[in-house]
Image (cartoon, rainbow, N blue to C red):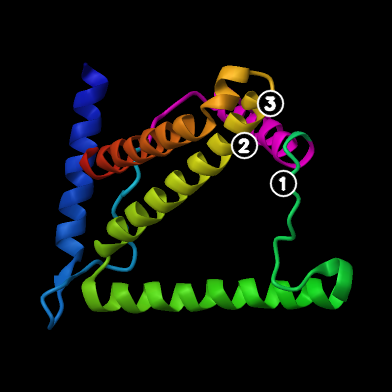
Amino acid sequence: MAENKENIVEMDKDSKSIEISSRTSESGAKVVGKNIIPHFFPTYRIKRNLYPIPISLVVIIAGILAYLTYVVVGVQIDGGYFPETEYGAIGGVLNGIIYTAIAALSGFIIIYIIKKKGINVLMYIFGIGFGMVGFLQTWFFGEIILFWLSQYNLVLYDYYYLFDVGLIIFTAVFTIVMIYKYFTST
């Protein structure tokens, strides 16, 4: 209980320091001082010696999903616009330039939006990004797992499309709950 009170006091100090060092721009958007950045992410504190556990779990699960995707299910597509098997190293360089240009352009757009609307718009940009990535990744890997399981289960194979619709609905609900928790957490 005392730890929660300390966290609340610390959060109050953070919000007061943000208010003190912020000013309002001509357009009415709040501009935050250079050294003060609000905390948009819900954080969880764990002991330092437990840091590798969530990272290791994510790496193991990602490895299993990548194995299922590439080897078991057979989804083997080139990730770039120019196939490296056809163009060689030039194809890899061109793909890198395209993705780097997209990232740089997106960065400039985000900076422009922040300058126009203030730093608090970042929370909404992150929320939209989390929602898109959460939905698409869960749906993609859910499809992979569903396809893999349907190869061994005749009932699942016969009603594959019904389970696929259920997967899409589950993924949409999961994403909505995730975004809701993100925007309502303190």
Please say if 130 is above or below 33: above
> How far from the left and from the top, in percent, is residue 51?
56, 29
Q: CA distance from mark 3 to mark 2?
A: 11 Å
> How far from the left and from the top, in percent, is residue 12?
17, 42
Mark 3 or mark 2, earlier in chain: 2
Observer able to see residue 102: yes
Observer able to see residue 36: no
Q: Residue at x 56, y 25 (%)?
A: 158
- Estimate how packed mark 3 is, as few (under 14), some (14 to 19) or many (20 or more) residues with alpha carbons within 10 Å: few
Main SS of the magenta part reads helix
Verify CB contact (< 8 Å) between mark 2 and mark 1: yes
Q: Nearer the viewer, residue 160 or 179?
A: 160
In the rendered structure, the answer to whether residue 49 lies left or right of residue 64 reads left
Which quadrant of the rendered structure holds the C terminus?
Answer: top left
Say what secondary structure mark 1 lies in.
Answer: loop
Residue under circle 1? 75
Residue under circle 2? 144
Residue 151 disc label: 3
In the rendered structure, the answer to whether residue 78 lies left or right of residue 147 reads right
Q: CA distance from mark 2 to mark 1?
A: 9 Å
Say what secondary structure mark 3 lies in.
Answer: loop
Q: Nearer the viewer, residue 37 or 107?
A: 107
Q: Nearer the viewer, residue 19 or 165?
A: 165
Say what secondary structure mark 2 lies in.
Answer: helix
- Estimate how packed mark 1 is, as few (under 14), some (14 to 19) or many (20 or more) residues with alpha carbons within 10 Å: few
Foreground mark, 1 or 3, reads 3
User: How many numbered discs?
Assistant: 3
Amino acid type, mark 3: Gln
Q: Which residues are magenta?
A: 43-71
